[in-house]
Image (cartoon, rainbow, N blue to C red):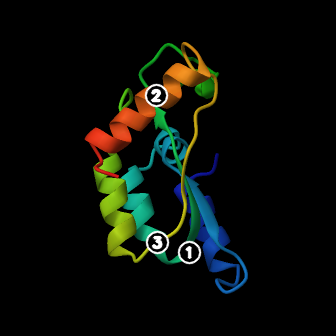
Amino acid sequence: MFSEEQIDFFAANTEPSFVGLCLDTAHTTIAGMSAPDAFRKYAARIEYVHLKDVDPTSAAGPQPMSSFRALGLGTVDFVGVLKGLRDGGYDGVLCVELDNPEVCNYNSAEVSRKYIRNALKL
């Protein structure tokens, strides 16, 4: 996980034609960034996206991976993220990801799929 300042430094010191970014919605949130703002800001450099929800208010303590949730069960503004990506011209892969599901992989995938179809209309 990196801070916005570290991502800015990396982006300023790498060649965009050779180096792209893979942003993760949960990690940007845990790092204290607004996920929609981060995805708008770095849209031109994004080559790959991880969609993952997070509840930063959970009792995860020093284990942030324990605060990851299936899509729609956390605090990430996915509508804002998708708008930022669209506005920036992103037309690539959106990879749904979940580390340490609360119940099981199948259940978490089903919850995320329903959220993607019903709330995000994808």
- Residue 39 is at least partly visible in this image: yes
Identify the secondary structure beneath mark 3: loop
State which tag comes first along the sequence, 1 or 3.
1
Q: Name the residue beneath numbered marker 1.
A: 45
In this rendering, would 36 be left or right of 11? left
Vertical placement of 40 versus 24: above or below? Answer: below
- Nearest-to-viewer mark from 2 and 3: 2
Q: Label 3 amino acid? A: Asp
Closer to the camera, 57 or 67? 67
Number of the label disc, if any, that sits on residue 11: none
Quadrant for the N terminus, please: top right
- Looking at the image, tell me whether mark 2 or mark 3 is earlier in sequence order: 3
| Secondary structure at numbered mark 2 | helix
**Three-letter code, disc 2:** Glu
* Residue mark closest to the camera, 2 vs 1: 2
**SS label for mark 1:** helix
Q: Residue at x 40, y 77 (%)?
A: 89
The x, y position of residue 49, in whole percent, is 55, 57
Q: Badge 1: how crowded within 10 Å, few (<14), some, or many (20+)?
A: some
Return the residue at label 3: 91
| Numbered label tally | 3
**Left or right: 83 with respect to 67?**
left
- C-alpha span from label 1 to label 3: 12 Å
The residue at which mark 2 appears reads as 110
Q: Quadrant of residue 81?
A: bottom left
Give the residue type at disc 1. Answer: Arg
Sequence-wise first label, 2 or 1: 1
For the point 39% across and 66% down, the residue is 85
